[in-house]
Image (cartoon, rainbow, N blue to C red):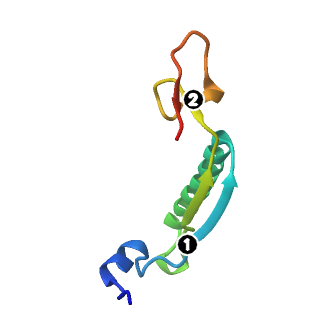
Amino acid sequence: MLKANPLLEAVIMPKSTSKVIFQDLGLIKYKECWEFQEQLFQKVIRRKTENEKLPKEQRIPTDNYLLFCEHPHVYTLGDPFISAFNCGSGLKVKIFAP
């Protein structure tokens, strides 16, 4: 029988964390997933910025996300953040695939 590891639990879910929103995005295009993550990030930034203007007791906790996804192969131009949807002609292209 496995015993609970309090140290591991503290790393995975600190007591200050109110909740984690789990989303399984399934198979999704790389660009769509990247844009979705950017939207979530901007939402968290807006909440944090709004919270700075409020007294501590009125602050609303930010959401925490755990996203799972799978995407088709991605071709890059030497930078893992520039994928095939930004490709120009005449450049060397790399593929990252299992």
Residue 31 spot, x, y in % from top left: 65, 39
Q: Residue at x 60, y 48 (%)?
A: 38
Q: Position of residue 53 (x, y in %)?
A: 52, 65
Q: Amino acid at mark 2?
A: Tyr
Residue 88 location, quadrant? top right
In the picture, which quadrant includes the N terminus? bottom left
Q: Relative to 36, say whether 21 is above or below.
A: below
Of residues 23 and 63, the one drawn nearer to the viewer in this rendering: 23
Query: Of callouts 2 and 1, which one flags the residue occurring earlier in the amino acid sequence?
Result: 1
Disc 2 vs disc 1: Cβ atoms closer than 8 Å?
no
Tell me the crowding category of disc 1: few under 14, some 14 to 19, or many 20 or more residues within 10 angstroms, Cα based: few
Estimate the x, y position of residue 18 in percent, counting from the top left.
Answer: 52, 79
Q: Is residue 38 left or right of residue 32?
A: left
Identified at 57% across, 74% down, the residue is: 60
Residue 81 badge: none
Mark nearer the viewer, 2 or 1: 2
**Which image quadrant is residue 7 in?**
bottom left
Tell me the element at label 1: loop
Can you identify the residue that label 2 sits on? Answer: 75
Foreground pick, 54 / 85: 85
- Residue type, mark 1 in image: Val
The residue singled out by tag 1 in the image is 20
Residue 48 x %, y %: 52, 62
For this orientation, the residue located farthest to the left is 7
- Tell me the residue at 56%/64% (across/down): 65
Q: Cα distance, mark 2 to mark 1?
A: 31 Å
Outermost residue, top side? 90
- Seen at 53% across and 13% down, the residue is 91
Q: Would you place residue 90 above or below residue 51 in this image?
A: above
In the image, residue 7 above or below residue 48: below
Look at the numbered disc 2 and give the secondary structure of its residue. Answer: strand
